[in-house]
Image (tube, grey):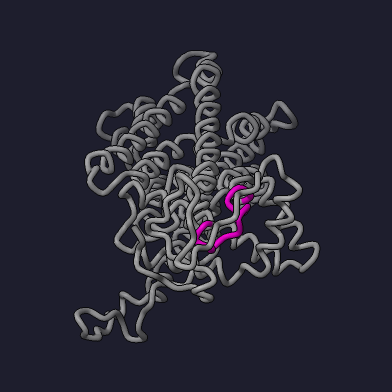
Amino acid sequence: MATLPPYPTYPDGPVDGGVLRHPHWWQRRWVRYGALITLLALSGLVILALVRQQTGTEGFLVGLALAVLPVPLLVAAFRWLDRVEPGPWRNLVFAFAWGACAAALIAIVANSFATRWIATTTADPNGADTLGATVIAPFVEESAKAAAVLLVFLFRRRDFTGIVDGVVIAGVTATGFAFTENILYLGTAFGTDQMSGGRGLASVTAATFFVRVVMSPFAHPLFTVLTGIGFGITALSAERQRVRRLLAPLGGLLLAMGMHAMWNGSAKFGEYGFFAVYAAFMAPAFGLLTWLVIWTRQRELRTVREELPAYAVAGWLGPVEPFVLGSLRARRLAREYAGHHFGKEAARSVAEYEAFATSVAFLRHRGRRGRAGADFIVRERELLCALWARRAVARPALEYAARVTAPVAPAMAPPVWHGHGYAPPHGVPLYGVPQHGPAAPYPGYNPYRR
């Protein structure tokens, strides 16, 4: 989703009861961003030193070269899932950095400390390793990764509106975590081969690469996605559903820990335990979650087609735009048309137009179900004004896409002007939709009509 200007603010701080209050230095945005970047950078340097210490320089470089291979594919897959209302890249960058740096550092330190403490207490190193892998590691790692989802949910609430957003943030966070973990495992395997003389397909490095990168690159994302779904359910829940809003993320986190524990303990189930767990649980769960996310995305497109006609009737959108914006193929054709005839900037404007239109559709959908926040009117006005500013480029492109995809985008009957407002077609309420038409040549708000 393209970036919108923030709420109206004042240079020195918000107005509270007519009194201008100066924010404290720690409340300034650049201070928060600086602290976050510093934290992630320090975590990255420490985790880099720890991994290099365990693998050696040569092993670290080999592990890095092999671990980076699945990252672009996984990030592209999650970005593809987020095509209906794409979130800003800064959220994905934060999620990946948190997983690769902060979460990985927490996991390495906590897992090592807990395993060492259990071994010292029980005098059973083998039992400590087993307990650490099946109990401690899932709890620590999933909690550390879930922290990124929680932070985005709390501080980027506008960008976190449903299940798909939770899946994308959780999946990218886990991709970053798996990237760092794979460097450690592959680098250690390479060091083992250097000492034992292993080469080729029979080497430990090749076996580790096959298991972690070829067979199960989706393992960590699959676990953490369950947590993301829980937060997505909370985002879709009304404020009054407090129990559901609290239990959904907690339930998702517990499921993630349980699946992670089963995966880590699969090697203890016998010679073929790993393959049995992979075939019986991991692959079906991956297929089920993939279907769920794609079904959710299709439901989002249906929401766009159902909610936007009210804005078309009110004059904010063209007659066929709700149906074009509810089709991913038509959206792509509109961007390609704008880029081919008017350049990259026009294509970017069309993409932003599509994102803003989707956001206003979701906002209206939540508002009609009593799930919108107190900033509903302000947010709706921001989105509509952003649409209006891009209409000159976007509308010709969307009309072209409507002509090409006529079976997908059926024409909507144009609204009828009666001198006092647009008459909505049967079944399309205009309650809460700001009117814009011949009597109001500029975007503006009239009182809600009933």
Q: Is residue 318 magenta?
A: yes
Above/below status of 398 relative to 183:
below
Above/below status of 441 relative to 51:
below
Q: Quadrant of the N terminus?
A: bottom right
- Specify whether 423 is left or right of 157: right
Residue 97 shows up from this direction: no
Question: Closest to the observer: 106 or 262?
Answer: 262
Q: How many marks?
A: 0
Residue 185 shows up from this direction: yes
Residue 139 % position (x, y): 34, 37
Q: Is residue 197 magenta?
A: no
Span shown in magenta: 313-324
Question: Closest to the observer: 270 or 263?
Answer: 263
Q: Quadrant of the C terminus?
A: bottom left
Residue placed furthest toward the right: 340
Instruction: Residue at 26%, 81% (x, y): give it.
Output: 15
- Specify whether 60 is left or right of 141: right
Residue 224 % position (x, y): 44, 39
